[in-house]
Amino acid sequence: MAIDPRDPDPGYLAFWREYLMSTLTTHRPDGTPHVVPVGVTYDPEAGVARVITNKASRKVANVLAAGPEGARVALCQVDKGRWATLEGVARINTDPDAVADAVRRYAERYGRTPAPNPDRVVVEIALTRAMGRA
């Protein structure tokens, strides 16, 4: 079922606020999918999802390889019969304030603040599509 990523129904948004891990799918330069588990935060007001990660990760390399226009990606989480997918265009943000904001959002959702990491960056996904059955 299609959902407006900037105006999800309360149940869909609540599902994205539960303590659940997600997967992030990026594409390697050869076109093959790279799927990894991630913690993600969803900000429908801004139309953005955020993933904090190390700048040397394969997911970051895949997004950067797509060029300045960004990389098409998908986030998905599943819990029994409930599922939700967010799609959009990812770019890497290295701004310290953006990283700190993403860490704060992560801590809010997952109930713990990640250890400091000077190599941390944010995969910011400008959302274009949402779907699911939450």
Image (cartoon, rainbow, N blue to C red):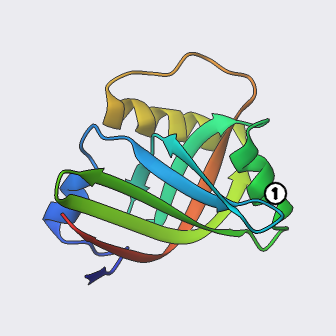
Q: Answer above or below: position of 108 versus 71.
A: above
Residue at 64%, 45% in the rendered image: 122
- Camera-side residue of 50 and 85: 85
- Seen from the viewer's position, the closer of residues 112 and 97 is 112
Q: Position of residue 14 (x, y in %)?
A: 19, 54
Q: Residue at x 49, y 71 (%)?
A: 87
Determine which quarter of the picture holds residue 2. bottom left
Give x and y (percent) for residue 44: 37, 65
Q: Is residue 93 above or below residue 109?
A: below
Circle 1 residue: 64
Residue 79 seen in this snapshot: yes
> In the orientation shown, which residue stands out farthest toward the bottom?
2
In the image, what residue type sits under mark 1? Leu
Relative to residue 5, is residue 31 drawn left or right? Answer: right
Residue at point 18% right, 51% down? 80
- Left/right placement of residue 116 relative to residue 75 reads right
Secondary structure found at label 1:
helix
Number of marks in picture: 1
Report the quarter where the C terminus lies.
bottom left
State left or right for residue 100 relative to residue 107.
right
Q: Position of residue 78 (x, y in %)?
A: 29, 53
